[in-house]
Amino acid sequence: MSKQPTKLAIIASAVMWALHAPHAMAQGAQVASSAAEQNQSVLVQVNEAYTLTFDGPVRLRQVLEQAVAQQGADIYWPNARLIDRAGTADLQQRQRELVAGLNLLRAYWLSRDNQTRADAVQGLAEQVAQWQLAYQPYLAIDLAAARQQLGANPLLAPGQYVLLTPERQDYVPVMGAMSPSRVRINPGYSVRQYMTQLVNTASSTPALNREHVTVVRPGGEFEQVPWGMHNARDSELTPGDILWVEPADSLFPRRFSALHQEIPELLRHWVGYGETLPPLDFNSRMAAVPYWQGFDTSPRRNHYGGVGLMQTPTARMADEGETVLMYADTDEYRRYTVSMQVLPWLQASAFYTRIPNRLYSNRPEFSGTNILTDKGFDVKLRLWQERQWLPEVSVGFQDFAGTGLFDGEYIVASKRYGAFDFTAGIGFGRNGSRDTVSNPFCDLADRFCDRSTQTVGTGSQLDFDRYFAGPAALFGGVEYQTPWEPLRLMLEYDGNDYSRDRAGVPIDASTPWNFGASYRVFDWLDASVSYERGDTLMFNVALRTNLNTLSQVRVDRPRVEPQTPSAQSVDDVDWNRLAHSISNARTVSAPRFNMPDDTTVRVQGHAWRYRDNNEAIDRSARILANALPESIETYEFEQLSAYMPVSLTRVDAEAFKRRIRNEDAGKRIDETAELFERESPAHDYEPAAWLYDYPRSNRIGYGLKPFFNQDFGSPETFHFYQLGVKAFASGWVARDLHLFGELGVNLKNNYDRFNFTRDPFDFDLPRVRSDFRLHATNDVWVDSLQATYYKRLSENVYGMAYGGYLERFFAGVGGEVLYRQIDSPWAFGVNINRVRQRNYEGWFGFEDYETTMGHASVYYQMPWLKDSLLRLDVGRFLAGDDGVGVTFSRRFDSGVTVLAYASFTNVSSEQYGEGSFTHGFSVSIPFDLIGIRPTRQRVSMSWSPMSRDGGQPLWRRIDLYGVTDERHPFWGR
């Protein structure tokens, strides 16, 4: 075995071969005797030492094993590269197009007399032109992985390849918005330390991005690493990395944004530079790693549950999906808050505040000695994110739809510098009661000069005349991250002097300065303590989780590995066995098969356990691939819901087999969803005969499910609860007729604390919901008993008719029709119901009240707002009032869905009573985040701050939009 050449010689020689010398493949190997034989062989040049020849397609494992046998086992696999010459010409063309695009961008800046940016673009174009690129379809190469996993052991098609196995590199190439170079790797040092030295040493452009850089890892992954003083994170460079110093985003106008994205994509295939990169060694000049750089700098919570210091907010936002349950305690207030980061730029909170020095009412027969509870909502919106010189800025509304006891608005900015996070803002309302500055909005309109001090009637009203009006005050503070990661210290100046608080006792704030500390006890628990107003000790505890990243260990069957088909012809297929294989895989329930033509097999059935339908199709198609003969060219999966066809997914059998056998260059074996073609099933399709028709079960399904109902802020006590269980049974008596019944049983409650079962208020509306207490005192009741008939009316129209005891309060009949095209974000429906109120005993009797109600509905999955659904229901509600219901749903990556709803009708706030209008929230959690088995079941929790009679819809247990979710999945993925 010859001596291994140096790494630079290996790269230079191999790149020159790959780009310019196809005849070099013959070096060290016997040339094939004919062109035909040549086209079927695999030739692999290993470095510049020798060539491996294989007569046909070969697995990567075999190539690597032979290379190791000749070269030795001392190979640093993260730096290994496999180059496919066949794709190099396309890369070169992309490179030329990129250079041409950059030249156009340079001309663009010159036309605007911006020589500085034009020079920066010219420097990028010159760098890109010097890149030596070679197509690398398999970016992560490792012999051990290839021996153990099919996904790491691709099949190499006939062609010419280069295998580079350089020694471990000591330097990392640096390119981008500074002169090209290579820096020595210093273990333990962060990207920020490298960048600080590079900016001070190498020639950088004014268009340097000082927010983040991109590190191209050996496996081809991109890591965007923040490195500014305000956002740096601890990330190190490793051998085989490429450090791409990002140009500023402003260098690329929108019409040229594709160029910005294409540059790092080409760097995946980078193997060398046209000239020697000058080495840089910063070892003697590297500053120590700042302690805060490796810490979790996610924001903490103030006493109101939102992101902030103690009493004051900051402009910061939590990670998307972060949810906090908080309790905060002072002498005057006890506050319970639920806060959620709904969107990256939107934080919302709902709270109850108990006021120990005030009674709920002056009527003992109504509320006894219970103390006052106030409820409300806070919201904060980010206007722009922090940059190197710009602070993060947000605007917020506190208690904006409550009674106004704690209402206030603010505009706030936050700027981080290392371990310190500084905040300054201006507050209005309660946040500005110290009145230290004149209200800047008063110069715009007189209405901003004064603010009413009265509370807002029945609450939940948007009083726009109060927003940003009245006295104003500055507030601010600083948070310090100590060298002990769990502990942070806080100092703030409070803009509230508490003069307008209605705590039942006077609050004398002797100083506006507050001091505090926040301690992260566990990853899921924060605790804070503070000394405020010069004489008051306060504390809070916050339980935190993230609904976006929530996950659970899953115990699941492995996917079927590809095998040689067990059948040579369709006549050899054991359809019964195939049906049970799919059924046992829990992908399709009760599958049945037919052949629309001689080369297509269709599987029809209901989705079973897997939320992600693409995963279910992948698992099912693998079973088909192992069972069906090669003559079958297409697999079709027709998914049913309530025995109605909702989607048809077509799979090219040969392409699918290549993918799962790892025979597609540059594709992972789990990237099969891109091979699935969806369409709407034909409405009138019915096969002449089924190859196998899975027997439909007439078995009645039954079970028990617990429930725990809660109500907060009632007159008699802060917390009412009921623990119980519901026994249910359901079954299909025909393919289009379903029966469902549910019996509720009370196990434990504290309803004995009721002072009344019907409140004394008369708001001139039928009591369709406000008599809940009369229902709640039953120990056993029929919750629902319903028959539902389903019908697909045309290709895009679905229908449903139902009747029975539809919910706990109402019985009757109704129907719904839905128009929904496949993969359309829009859907339109209408439902109408004739219902009668059930009596309070909970069995089968009725009250006198009956009504006809229903809605026309519009559904829109907003593509411009990630995983969001807006629903509008226009029509008549249960109390005979007319209006619109608005529902906004947000789905997180984990599958958890949060929902907010409100109804606005022709019932005035005075007629409605406390709460002013119907509104509430709901959280739906996939059950596989709770259990360990895959399932499509979900568990929901709802909360409504006040349930009165106006704007109340019928609680239908099922609707056609949910039934047809697979038409354009929202929940089922």
Image (cartoon, rainbow, N blue to C red):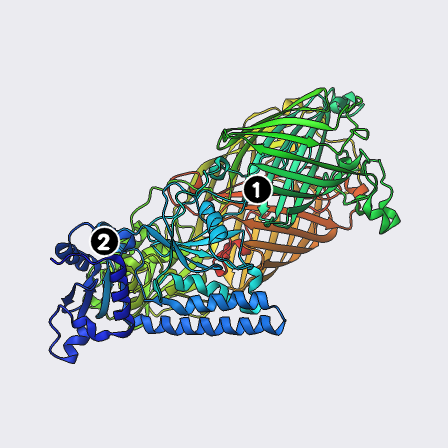
Cα gap from disc 1 to disc 2, whole angstroms: 41 Å
Foreground residue among 476 and 126: 126
Residue situated furthest bottom in the rendering: 35
- Residue 942 drawn above or below residue 518: below
Residue 811 visible somewhere in the drawing = no
Identity, as a three-letter code, of the amino acid under mark 1: Ala
Specify the quadrant of the image occupied by residue 11: bottom left
Label 1: element kind: loop
Q: Nearer the viewer, residue 459 or 118?
A: 118
Question: How many numbered marks appear?
Answer: 2
Q: Residue at x 80, y 46 (%)?
A: 908
Q: Position of residue 489 (x, y in %)?
A: 59, 29
Mark 2 crowdedness (10 Å alpha carbons): few <14, some 14-19, many ≥20: some
Q: Earlier in the sequence, mark 1 or mark 2?
A: 2
**Can you tell which quarter of the image residue 330 is in?**
top right
Q: Position of residue 73 (x, y in %)?
A: 17, 50
Is residue 522 visible in this depiction of the protein?
yes
Q: Is residue 448 left or right of residue 367?
A: right
Task: Report whether 116 appears left or right of 886.
Answer: left
Quadrant (top left, top right, bottom left, bottom right) of the N terminus: bottom left
Q: Which residue is drawn at the image coordinates 15% and 52% (left, top)?
A: 72
Residue 218 horizontal/vertical position (percent): 34, 54
| As drawn, 207 above or below 794 | above
Where is mark 2, residue-wise? 146
Residue position for label 1: 318
> Residue 91 versus residue 850: which sits nearer the camera?
91
